[in-house]
Amino acid sequence: MADTVREVERKYEADSQGPARLPDLSEVAGVATVADQEPAELDAVYYDTADRRLATAGITLRRRTGGTDAGWHLKLPVAPGTRDEIRAPLSSDVPRALAALVRSRTRHARLAPLVRIVSRREVHLLLDEHGRVLAEASADEVTATRLADGGRTAHWTEFELELGKDTDPGFLDTVEPHLRAAGLRPSKAPSKLSRALTETDPGPARPEKRKRRPAKPGKPTAGDHVLAYVRTQAEAVVTGDLDVRRDVEDSVHQMRVATRRLRSAFRTFGKVLDREVTDPIAAELKWLAGELGVDRDREVLSARLRDRVDEVPDTLVLGPVRARLRRWAAARHSGARKRLVSVLDSERYLALLDTLDALLAAPPLLPAADGAPRKTVAKAVLRDYRRLARRLDRALATEAGPGRDTALHEARKAAKRVRYAAEAAKPALGKPAKRFARRMKSVQSLLGEHQDSVMAREALRALAIQAHAAGESTYTLGLLHGREEALAAAYERELPEVWRKASAKRHRAALRA
């Protein structure tokens, strides 16, 4: 698969009195020369599922001939006006690599030709005094034909300003007044495909003879609040899938967090969503989080051990410690990465995504879902808080050692659940929930540091066993193990004061106010 190209662009259309051609842009500040290119004819066929799952997500997949970049193009939204374009060589069928990237959207649905768009393009390069391309301004005479549903056709002229590779995004703002002065305005459609689907719709709705007042929306309920949160996290899982497949930095962590937030929400809001329905889904989310954790935990642990070795004076680094650590990390990464991709391609995972869709389409709401969100949500957050308090009391009363390590780990998971619950409550409870979430995060973070130390000691012991078997010195690994023990003890001494500050009664009272 070819590389990824980041596109930053703005699309324009002519108003009723506007031109059919681009205006002269030679007077734009910073532009030394406008270089006209030979006109090109671009012929693109856009693919999607029958129910337009890609288009709904703002994703386009096309096979295009003509121009300088003929081939398959998968365009993914990054931000308004910004997309990543992933390219693959021209072929007759959808490339497997591109189809795999959007599998969390398409599932088992077939990708088929949807619309054909032919554009006659005129391009003008805006160059600075050094001949560097600041931007590419183009005018497209577009003909779009729907490839089913009667084959309706639409025609329009579209104007586009695409930023050069190393140009400051502010340059788009510099050019825009010149385009507006010439009778162009920002396009209402985010893409050619979007406009083509609208203008070739086989069944346009008839305009109403008279305006009607829109129905007044009812007051939001607890069910509305919870479902909005669940919907957001489910979308984050699907979006995260695509980023994980592309190996985007931190994507595994973000996708794992979304699965955990979903699972936590099902438990926290068990009075709103029937747990007889959500518990089996939560079990599958736990499985998915575990699979995602193989890669994520490896990244965190490897980074921690590298940092700890770097803190040791060179005179105390005995044996090939860094080399052994690199081999250990590389082996874990290779296996984890391969397994993770196979998980995302598995029937079990795709079935989980389908189940989440079904849950949102027909949510199993309980009577409490009809209540006001503020009271219901506050009660849910405080229930989780009481659970955390019990676990921390048990952990702090446990004698130091493996038993306390386990108890503190259980308290960490409870703290994370309270934090997630408070974050989910922010739309209903406002600033008190935001502040409560921040305080619970301080507790979770300290407990997380403690658990990371526990995992580091386990890894160091395993590395020491390997080093000893190979005849290498284990002195440095033992030294690191002792330092991690000391860190864990320091975290345990710090915990009571952190918890006292975070659990003050007034913070809980603010949630009820």
Image (spheres, rainbow, N blue to C red):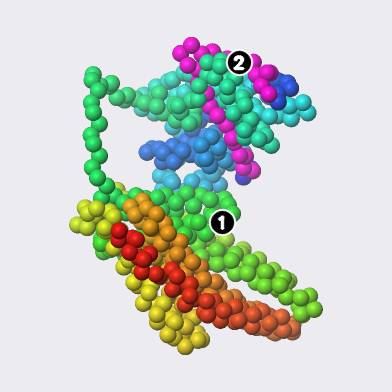
**Vertical relation: 204 (above or below) 164:** above
Query: Quadrant location of the C terminus?
Result: bottom left
Q: Position of residue 369 (x, y in %)?
A: 24, 55
Label at residue 470: none
Tell me which residue sits at (50%, 21%) in the image: 185
Q: Residue furthest front?
A: 506
Task: Judge the density around disc 2: few (<14), some (14-19), many (≥20) Cα neighbours within 10 Å.
Answer: some
The residue indicated by pointer 1 is 250
The residue indicated by pointer 2 is 23
| Residue type indicated by callout 1 | Asp
Q: Are marks 1 and 2 in contact (CB under 8 Å)?
A: no
Tell me which residue sits at (66%, 79%) in the image: 480
Examine the image and state in which quarter residue 54 appears. top left
Q: Secondary structure at mark 2?
A: loop
Q: Position of residue 408 (x, y in %)?
A: 46, 77
Tell me if I can see residue 328 in this picture: no
Task: Judge the density around disc 1: few (<14), some (14-19), many (≥20) Cα neighbours within 10 Å.
Answer: few
| Residue type indicated by callout 2 | Pro
The magenta segment is 3-29
Q: Position of residue 30 (x, y in %)?
A: 70, 26
Q: How many marks?
A: 2
Is residue 8 one of those drawn in magenta? yes
Q: Is 509 left or right of 249, judged from the image as shown?
A: left
Is residue 243 one of those drawn in magenta? no
**Vertical relation: 283 (above or below) 127:** below
Q: Residue furthest right?
A: 315
